[in-house]
Image (cartoon, rainbow, N blue to C red):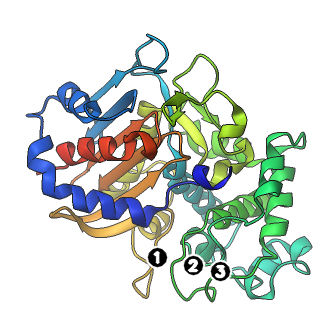
């Protein structure tokens, strides 16, 4: 089934995190991260959890505890990889921002010019949608393409991921909109798939190659992969069992919407670069692009890749946030650019096994005072 695996929307997770502030005093673990992780797993069916705390441009502390699989005895290690779901969306947005910085793309060019070969078959409402609207969830596109059976065919599709994405969005762009483009935020995984296809067409490179060349290599991110984790690695879980079949996860071509796995340190490398931008020390983007990614857009609604809040659980922001899950994993991130602090948490299970509550509890225990 497709629906249980769809990436967790940001709004729901932010609400849950804010509600979790009421129990913060009970989850604070006196600075002992190992204890905080262990306590979060109590009463949960989640096999393992990991967390990283960022401060002053570096990793202040990191820890992982639990089992890679709940049917085995191998414990998770600090260099294990975790699928971070929609927390990869800010990375996709950063890639597109880098191409705009270079003059390869424009934020305001309409979709009919960016993907002219699809103009005639796309819903007329989408023809004037811009790149910035796609990446800020204001395109009017539905969250996901409605044809579940068609989506499932990509598990066995032998075409390149680039060809698969183009085929996917060609159909998705023919669907009716859920809102007038530009009118309001309507969370859309499809919007990020379209943005990736735009980047691929403009550069004649695959999204995967672009991410390696433009983000992962410059930031020293070495343990990154597309799609779910491989056999022998840390494994996702749902309904009390490890997920062993590829068809129980989203197809690998879905990576731009949030289907990346990586070590916690690699994830931290990207987040540290976002924090460094506040001091003018970001490596990837121009100062203008960092500001665009880390601010609410004019008009007071929507932001680029990140969810941007004025505060979180009483902590003054701005706060850059995201949450992600494919139903088999759960991950949260919160960054405070002005203080240079951040928290990243990941679990190898879905919400049905309590991973959402476990990650929220750890995050609340690590938020800056």
First in sequence: mark 2 vs mark 3:
3
SS under mark 1 = loop
In the rendered image, which residue does mark 2 sit on? 138
Which dot, 2 or 3, sits closer to the camera? 2
Q: Position of residue 190 (x, y in %)?
A: 67, 64
Q: Residue at x 40, y 38 (%)?
A: 346
Any mark on residue 302, and which? Answer: 1
SS under mark 2 = loop
Q: Residue at x 27, y 34 (%)?
A: 43
Residues at marks 2 and 1, CA–CA distance in whole angstroms: 7 Å
Q: How many marks?
A: 3
Q: Is 151 placed left or right of 32 in the picture? A: right
Residues at marks 2 and 3, CA–CA distance in whole angstroms: 13 Å
Q: Is 10 placed left or right of 250 in the picture? A: left
Residue 133 visible to an observer of this rendering: yes
Residue 270: quarter of image: top left
Q: Is 214 placed left or right of 369 in the picture? A: right
Q: Residue at x 90, y 43 (%)?
A: 159
Instruction: Name the outermost residue toward the top.
Output: 73
Q: Are marks 2 and 1 in contact (CB under 8 Å)?
A: yes
In the rendered image, which residue does mark 3 sit on? 108
SS under mark 3 = loop
Does 43 appear above or below 300?
A: above
Circle 3 packing at 10 Å, graded few (<14), some (14-19), many (20+), is few
Q: Position of residue 95 (x, y in %)?
A: 60, 55
């Amino acid at each position: 089934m497709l629906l249980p695996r769809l990436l967790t929307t940001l709004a729901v997770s932010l609400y849950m995190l804010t509600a979790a502030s009421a129990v913060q005093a009970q989850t604070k673990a006196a600075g002992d991260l190992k204890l905080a992780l262990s306590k979060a797993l109590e009463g949960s069916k989640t096999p393992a959890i990991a967390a990283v705390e960022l401060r002053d441009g570096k990793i202040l502390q990191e820890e992982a505890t639990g089992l890679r699989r709940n049917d085995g005895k191998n414990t998770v290690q600090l260099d294990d990889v975790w699928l971070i779901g929609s927390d990869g969306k800010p990375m996709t947005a950063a890639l597109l921002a880098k191409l705009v910085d270079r003059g390869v793309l424009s934020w305001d060019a309409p979709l009919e010019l960016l993907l002219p070969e699809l103009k005639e078959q796309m819903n007329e409402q989408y023809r004037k949608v811009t790149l910035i609207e796609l990446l800020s969830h204001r395109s009017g596109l539905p969250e996901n393409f409605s044809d579940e059976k068609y989506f499932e065919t990509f598990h066995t599709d032998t075409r390149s991921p680039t060809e698969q994405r183009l085929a996917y969005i060609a159909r998705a762009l023919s669907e009716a909109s859920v809102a007038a483009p530009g009118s309001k935020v309507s969370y859309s995984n499809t919007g990020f798939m379209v943005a990736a296809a735009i980047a691929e067409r403009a550069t004649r490179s695959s999204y995967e190659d672009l991410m390696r060349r433009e983000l992962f290599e410059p930031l020293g991110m070495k343990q990154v992969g597309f799609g779910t984790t491989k056999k022998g690695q840390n494994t996702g879980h749902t309904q009390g069992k490890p997920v062993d079949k590829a068809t129980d996860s989203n197809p690998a071509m879905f990576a731009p919407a949030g289907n990346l796995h990586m070590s916690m340190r690699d994830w931290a490398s990207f987040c540290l670069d976002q924090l460094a931008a506040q001091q003018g020390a970001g490596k990837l983007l121009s100062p203008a692009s960092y500001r665009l990614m880390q601010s609410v857009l004019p008009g007071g609604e929507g932001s680029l890749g990140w969810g941007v809040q004025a505060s979180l659980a009483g902590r003054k922001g701005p706060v850059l946030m995201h949450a992600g899950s494919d139903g088999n994993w759960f991950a949260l991130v919160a960054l405070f650019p002005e203080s240079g602090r951040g928290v990243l948490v990941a679990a190898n299970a879905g919400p049905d096994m309590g991973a959402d509550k476990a990650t929220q509890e750890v995050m609340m225990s690590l938020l800056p005072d």
